[in-house]
Image: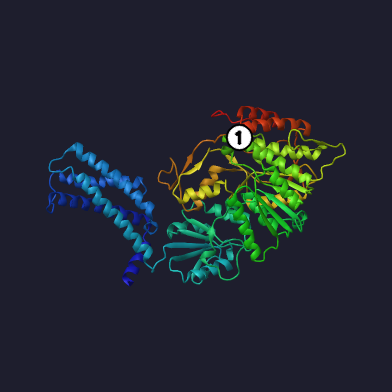
Amino acid sequence: MHTSRLFLSRVLEWPRRIKQIFVVGLDAAMGVFAMWLAFTLRLEALHTPEGAQWLVYGLAPVLALPIFVTRGLYRAIFRYTGIKALITTGKAVALYGALLFTTLLFVQWENVPRSVGLLQPLIFLLLVGSSRALGWLWLAGNPGKSPQRLLIYGAGRAGAQTAAGLVSTPQYQLLGFIDDDPAKLGQSIDGVQVHGPASLSKLVHKQQVTDILLAVPSATRQRRHQIIESMRQLPVRIRTLPGLSDLASGRVTMADFQELDVEDLIGREPVTPNSELIERNLANQIVMVTGAGGSIGSELCRQIVRERPATLLLVDHSEYALYSIHQELLALKDKGLHNCTLVALLTSVGSVDRLDAIFRAHRPSSVYHAAAYKHVPMVESNPGEGVLNNVFGTLNVVRLALTHGAKHLVLVSTDKAVRPTNIMGASKRIAEQILQAVSAANQMPFADSDHRESNPSWLCPTRLSIVRFGNVLGSSGSVIPLFRQQIASGGPVTVTHPEVTRYFMTIYEAAQLVLQAGAMAEGGDLFLLDMGAPIRIEQLARRMIALSGLTVKDDSHPNGDVKILFTGLRPGEKLYEELLISDNPLATQHPRILRAREEYKPWPALAKLLEQLQSSAKANDTAALKQVLRELVPGYAPFSKNGD
């Protein structure tokens, strides 16, 4: 055992190029041996090559090795060989076998049986596959050497605790610390030297580092982003400790390290919430959230229960989504993290009678309307249902909130409502206009075409407001979980267009700002959330691939690991999203919340067009529906690549 460990240690210390040359030589030898064994089995006697048979022996490595190189077999590390690598090996040998058999079939050398072209690749596949599997078992299973060679970025308390936790973990080998503090350079922690950031690239390549652990939990989000960006070109996997507020006290272990979160990917520094604003509409109140099981709705619920409401009404039409968030909040209540009464209500915002019964029974004082069909291609393919849900579902919620005396109603909107090219965005802009028009009108919004309430002295009893923002990272429709899944499966990572650009923020921050914006409402307000700088989706994909320790495979790097595939813009999708129709938004008391003043149709004119829209949507008359949308939403330019 000691001899095996010693030999393994020396093998792992070989330069990568030497390891690759060794494996290439091993494959060449196995190819020649497989040819000898194929002749021996075919001729039923120990074979001694002669004449043209020597050419066939040499043909095996000449054909096989270039194929293995182009298929990336020598980029793989035996310690991480898995089923996918073995499948790749099988495909490479199959291609080699086809070329060998074709060559023997057409050249027809004397004393060279054609069946050797079938028998030799089978033997060769068995030898190559076995060598990979045995190498993996030896390297990964030998306890004398760690399969993961680590650097810890951060030589502070968290880094030292991490190093202490690695001592008793044989599958990891700590090779050094990296730290920005000049006073720590050249020092050592438990015999492990501290290096400066300038030495990082050299260390990674010289020491064959596979992983870097980012142990700087007290660093700002911006600083963490800078550190991560500085390591993006290195062939390593990066993992990180959570922030100090999320990190339990005590010894840090490998279990505390996690994949880079979405905040690390965009480098956006969170703003400390204004607790007074958040509590204003929530404490001791009856609060309703529609779309409570969705990405934004569920996060709103998580944050609302922390503000001590008396009751939280969870409204959703998806049984599973409603069950999931209800169970999650019940578990938090069992842990003593809140004492809110939770009521799960299964219905659609299109079911006006059911909604009316809910409002009548519970009398919510604050309503957060997050229910919407938001998947652009899906709504584009189902325009009638999308409009009925997004427009008239909103109208139902607004009318019932007014009828039953809710004090506040906040509509969660989207940047796709700005100069929309799709039905989803247009429907959300109309929903915005409903709140703006009703807030300014002296009429209760209609329940149906025969129902009107008009009173010149009527004032809207409910403070209606809209919060508009862009994409949220990590949501059910976000590219982040999709990209992670695609990278984990070896790619390709799918991006619609090289220039497609989006604004991003985290679900947590978006929900937090929605709650704060709603508390600032005066009536008919349209709030915009500061989304920071837009991000190109291709850049985000490249960043995620690099930070996973992999490389992008393209024309310039044919031997890369993961390919980016451009699939084309989907129906209704824009290259660039905008947050503002008009210019010059106004500041508010919160640094990341702006107030916009945008044109809308007065309620009487809007109501007439809504009747036409409802009729077209119920009939699923797409052409008529789009025509009404053009009248309702200035700037609506429907996507027409595939027609209606």
Left or right: 310, with 215 as reference point:
right
Q: Amino acid at mark 1?
A: Pro
Q: Is 397 situated above or below 167? A: above
Q: Mark 1 highlights which residue?
A: 383
Residue under the image location 74 percent in, 49 percent down: 359
Left or right: 208, with 520 as reference point:
left
Quadrant location of the N terminus in the rendered image: bottom left
Q: Position of residue 107 (x, y in %)?
A: 19, 37
Left or right: 362, with 476 as reference point:
right
Q: Residues within 10 Å of mark 1 (few under 14, many from 20)?
A: many
**Element on which disc 1 rests:** helix
Residue under the image location 11 percent in, 53 percent down: 45
Q: Which residue is situated farthest in the right direction here? A: 457
Taking the image as drawn, is residue 592 in sight? no
Which quadrant of the view contains residue 22?
A: bottom left
Quadrant location of the C terminus in the rendered image: top right
